[in-house]
Image (cartoon, rainbow, N blue to C red):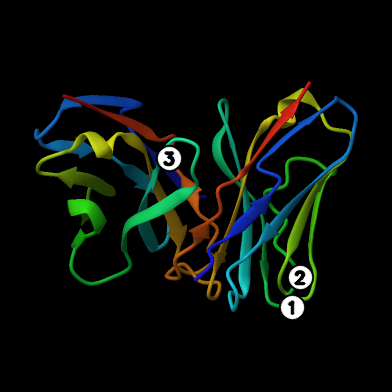
Amino acid sequence: AQSVTQLDSQVPVFEEAPVELRCNYSSSVSVYLFWYVQYPNQGLQLLLKYLSGSTLVKGINGFEAEFNKSQTSFHLRKPSVHISDTAEYFCAVSEGNAGNMLTFGGGTRLMVKP
Amino acid sequence: GAGVSQSPSNKVTEKGKDVELRCDPISGHTALYWYRQSLGQGLEFLIYFQGNSAPDKSGLPSDRFSAERTGGSVSTLTIQRTQQEDSAVYLCASSLQTGGRYEQYFGPGTRLTVT
């Protein structure tokens, strides 16, 4: 069975500083990897996804993530955050050879301070 | 175009009552999913439908939970004899097809409170 671990439940950061949100997964088969963002009282919005090919993927709002197969990680990064990036971020995996239900990590609350 | 919609947005019910939660997927999407988001358990998969195939019910936590999808479009999640531990936000998502590479689009959720 697959599982996802987000190591930090909360990440406080000052505006315009860089940020990295960590995600590690475990699976016995190939996976697809996703990052979703959830703003207060809203549903989940896809930030970016890794399906295959280049291990560095770029998403919306200036976010990017790097797939590292040997370390089974998919960390999310942004070089300069804005107040509007304050939200909950979820890493998720779906196994490539099965139905595509998503398995989510516990989420990381990014708090951007002025 | 219109996204995934869910109704009601909020539902308060008494323990032991039955509730129905509705999901309208994006038009043309053949796959539909239900997830639950709760403080203790995070985001959990419940059930998914793909076209006319039998649904994958592997995530349903008990037999009090059921779901149906009529005409390949609208879906209803039913919880019978609600318990306080059922309090959560229930999220619906749809995608063009099943298969891990297809993006899932999420609705705003229904917040269920069982008193």
* Quadrant in which residue B28 is drawn: bottom right
- Chain at numbered mark 3: A
For label 1, the residue is B52
| Residue identified by numbered label 3 | A105
Under circle 1, the secondary element is loop
Say left or right for A91 vs B18. left
List the residue tagged with mark 2: B54
Judge whether B75 appears above or below B97 on screen: above
The three-letter code of the residue at mark 3 reads: Gly
Position of residue A71 relative to residue B112, above or below, is: below
- The chain identifier of the residue carrying mark 1 reads B
User: Contact, CB < 8 Å: mark 1 with mark 3?
Assistant: no
- Which type of secondary structure does the marked residue at label 3 adopt? loop
Q: Are marks 1 and 3 on the same chain?
A: no
* Amino acid at the residue labelled 2: Ala
Can residue A63 be seen here? no
Residue density around tag 3, few if under 14, some if 14–19, many if 20 or more, within 10 Å: many
